Amino acid sequence: MVLAGGIGGARFLRGLKSAVPDADVTVIGNTGDDIHLFGLKVCPDLDTVMYTLGGGIHEGQGWGRADETFAVKEELAAYGVGPDWFGLGDRDFATHIVRTQMMSAGYPLSAVTEALCTRWQPGVRLLPMTDDRVETHVLIDTADLGESSQAGGEDGGKDSRKAIHFQEYWVRLRASVDAHAVVPVGAESAKPAPGVLDAIAEADVVLFPPSNPVVSVGTILAVPGIREAIADAGVPVVGLSPIVGGAPVSGMADKVLSAVGVEATAAAVAQHYGSGLLDGWLVDTVDADSTQAVEDAGIRCRAVPLMMTDTEATAAMAREALALAEEVRA
Amino acid sequence: MVLAGGIGGARFLRGLKSAVPDADVTVIGNTGDDIHLFGLKVCPDLDTVMYTLGGGIHEGQGWGRADETFAVKEELAAYGVGPDWFGLGDRDFATHIVRTQMMSAGYPLSAVTEALCTRWQPGVRLLPMTDDRVETHVLIDTADLGESSQAGGEDGGKDSRKAIHFQEYWVRLRASVDAHAVVPVGAESAKPAPGVLDAIAEADVVLFPPSNPVVSVGTILAVPGIREAIADAGVPVVGLSPIVGGAPVSGMADKVLSAVGVEATAAAVAQHYGSGLLDGWLVDTVDADSTQAVEDAGIRCRAVPLMMTDTEATAAMAREALALAEEVRA
């Protein structure tokens, strides 16, 4: 059982499948960064897992399709229809067209995801965290948007803030401005998708891959019932730090960590999850001096290489995580 | 004012614009062959006019976009999602995505068409015949579908018939089986789109291009109010025969003519429109011997070359139509 975000989660899963090819793996995918673009339902994290494990991923960028073309995007731009900052390729568009058509016909996202996976055969059972709509929003200063403040006016509007979609923050703004809060809108009333709680209850081990602890794993845990089910499952829960040497391995996780008041260190992320949830935590060897702080927080901790440079290195990380799980189980 | 169907209508319009570049031309486009594919609203006739006059048409086939690629279609096939018989290219998909998104946002088709035309600048005012949903269905023998008859059973089901979408008849079956009826479903309760009746009332001349008289022009005339407005406009109404030498110039118009009991001859089509609607009719020079029959039906008739081999030949046809209009006006 793995809770997966985007690129980090997908790559970790590929290593895990390589380490234990016969293991029955269920993946709970983050849907908080789903977005409607051009009237189509786009699920970046689910698709990244599906494409990565199904052999369709653009290896260089870690998301989107290999051998991609951009005729549709060019045409949309010629029509003056935006946004232009989200790079949807032609092949990728087909996925969103199929998904949107099925959802319009009344199928829930979980059923649609299962249908899409019959093509991709990812070798894992991929479940969205919820069939309900959850949208991660990021609160920023309107001044940082480079737009004239609407709330401002005579007071100067210096303090006026605006919630924008996570994708706008992450992709359009490249997380270049401060995030004051990260809110999974709709999460409080969302229900776990069919199969999610059962899969947690039946899991032998729960792994948190080196995904973003706020906007990926954090969003999944924000769906009522999921955090509790994991904490109560009575099986080892082991995570891998997405922070190495005080900086996120990839992405811009430090910005959203700071929004929730968490330092961008391997130890701080473990403490953020907390010993009520986590039993074990892997930090990179460069962060070996932080293992004591994690252990002091009641979480078993080991320092091992955590750079997913290739599938073999990633498989080694997965084996370390499973070994730590057995250690805490014993 | 021109009532336009697909390829024939679009090519005629290009000739008309070449013949009288400064004329104010309003086009009423057929929407009866619109179809929802992959959850997207596709308007083949409107798009053919828009692409042809806007310089984006695939000249060889007469429909769809030039320089087209098919990545989306390939991917949809890989997902096992059909139909596979309708050739949507990537560039074309963008048009349908924009249209569908705008319609989902509540814009009527007429407003969407206007928006799409701001890009294409077709040089005419393009109005859909209606903003309401009209779908041309064709009644065929189920046996001809090569499917087991559902209505059949013990009686043999030899006479069981099925109504299929016009596009399925035209594109998938290539009109290879008999059509027993052509029904513009929804037409009886459709209203002319905003501007249609006003444009007819203000027109100096109304032209019926050499489009399909049943499924193109006939469908437009089936929208209550349009036929009456044209008949009552008090201006010359002149048509050009789509039948030359007893066969449709392009397409498979004879099949749908036979469904409405009209012979596939230039004279029979004029008589089908009738002198209550038509003031003048152009037949091809090879059909010169049929002019008398048309005149006898109370419709002024001339025989001129009617093959749209290039824009100049088509412009000459447009000039002949306008000359005939002035003749009947005098």
Image (cartoon, coloured by chain):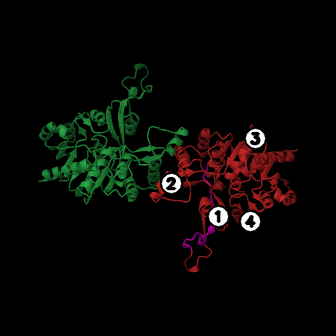
Chain colours: A green, B red
Q: Amino acid at mark 3?
A: Glu
Residue ID for mark 2: B73
Name the chain letter of the residue that bears numbered label 3.
B
Disc 4, disc 2: CB below 8 Å? Answer: no
| Residue B43 x/y as whole percent | 60, 50
Q: Amino acid at mark 4?
A: Gly
| Residue A161 x/y as whole percent | 37, 29
Between the residue at mark 3 and the residue at mark 4, the CA separation in whole angstroms equals: 34 Å
Q: Residues within 10 Å of mark 1 (few under 14, many from 20)?
A: many
Give the mark nearer the N terminus: 2 vs 1. Answer: 2
Does residue B224 appear in the picture of this structure? no
Residue B110 vs residue B148, the one in the foreground: B148
Name the chain letter of the residue that bears numbered label 4.
B
Residue ID for mark 1: B175
Q: Is residue B273 above or below residue A304?
A: below
| Residue B196 x/y as whole percent | 69, 45
Disc 1 is placed on an element classified as loop
